[in-house]
Structures are given as C-alpha cells and as structure tokens.
Image (cartoon, rainbow, N blue to C red):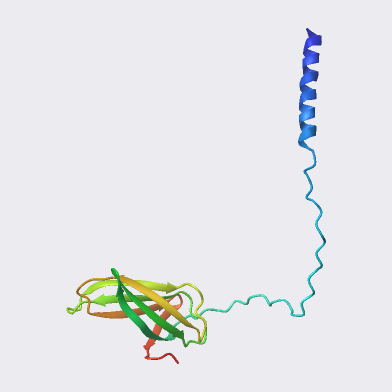
Amino acid sequence: MKRFAFASSVCVLLAFTTVSVFAQAKPAQAPATKAVAPAPASTTPPAAPAKFIKPLKGTAEVEFMEVSAKRIGDDIVTILKIKNLSPSPVSLLKVDEYWYNKAQKLVTGDSAAWRKPFMPGEIIELTIKAPYKSDIAVSQYQFSHAGGSVNPKRVKKLS
C-alpha cells in the first residue's frame, strides 16, 4: 500500500512541475523594427513650473455687459461678458440672475459660475439659462466670489 501512495504522490508532483515549467515560458518577442533617428535637440529651455498666485480676498472690481437675453425654447438664455479689473485673480466667480414680474415679485432665476481663476484683465463669457415664465418683466444680477463680495459696473462696451 505504501508503494502505491508513493507512486501516486510522485505522479502528482511531476504533473505540477511540468505545468509550472510551461507557465514560465518566455513571451514571444516583437519583430525587430528599423531604428528611428533621434529628434534634434530643441534650443528652447523647458517651461518653468507653474507658480501659485494668491487669489483676491475682499471686494473684487468687475465690468460686465449683457451681450444678449433671448427666449430659446422654454428657457431665457442670457449671455454676459465680464472683465476683471482687480489686481489679483478672482476665484470661483458666481453670477445669480433673478427675474421679477411687474409687481416686483420674484418669478424665476438661475446662476452660473466660473470655476477657474479669473485673472486680472481677463474677459470671460458666462451663459445663464433660466426657465421662461409668461409674466417676467425685468432681471437683476447678483455677483459673488469665494474671497468676498464683488462690485460690478454695468457698461455698454468693455474697456
């Protein structure tokens, strides 16, 4: 009986050994390709790493103009162009638009946000989509940013 157990153990060990030997075979290599000449060294230095610019804390100064306000389908789409007049970048600029009826009651509104830093002198375009209501008369904008309040100035043409 011991001989039979020994013989079967040897057979099992040989089976596992052959499987592991074949499993470690080298993968097929890709065919050799022609050597490509290296690109000529560029004479421009590498770009400098990006620098962190401290965002504005306090009141931001901006100019804005209403490019258009149209009814498109079931929405009133307003496009605003805004220019940063502050000396530092404004972070997370947000514009809320409120629509009122003739009785000065709030009817509808929406908001739009600029998630990137709004750099000094930069002009951005925000699109605000508010649901259309039949009794709207006039709109009002409220500006804000992450570091404080915004002092908006409405102009007919951005400077």
Looking at the image, the residue that sits furthest to the left is 103
Residue that appears at 28% across and 79% down = 139
Q: Is residue 62 left or right of residue 74?
A: right
Q: Is residue 102 left or right of residue 128?
A: left
Res 35 quadrant in image: bottom right
> How far across and how far down the image is residue 102, in percent?
18, 79
Report the quarter where the N terminus lies: top right
Residue that appears at 78% across and 37% down = 24
Q: Is residue 39 left or right of residue 92?
A: right
Res 133 quadrant in image: bottom left
Out of 60 and 111, give the one closest to the viewer.
111
In the rendered view, tell whether residue 90 sits above or below residue 131: below
Report the quarter where the C terminus lies: bottom left
> How far across and how far down the image is residue 90, in percent?
48, 79
Q: Is residue 27 left or right of residue 70?
A: right
Q: How many marks?
A: 0
> How far across and how far down the image is residue 59, in percent?
43, 84
Residue that appears at 42% across and 83% down = 82
Res 40 quadrant in image: bottom right
Out of 104 and 151, give the one closest to the viewer.
104
Residue that appears at 23% across and 74% down = 106
Looking at the image, the residue that sits furthest to the top is 1
In the rendered view, tell whether residue 74 sits above or below residue 141: above
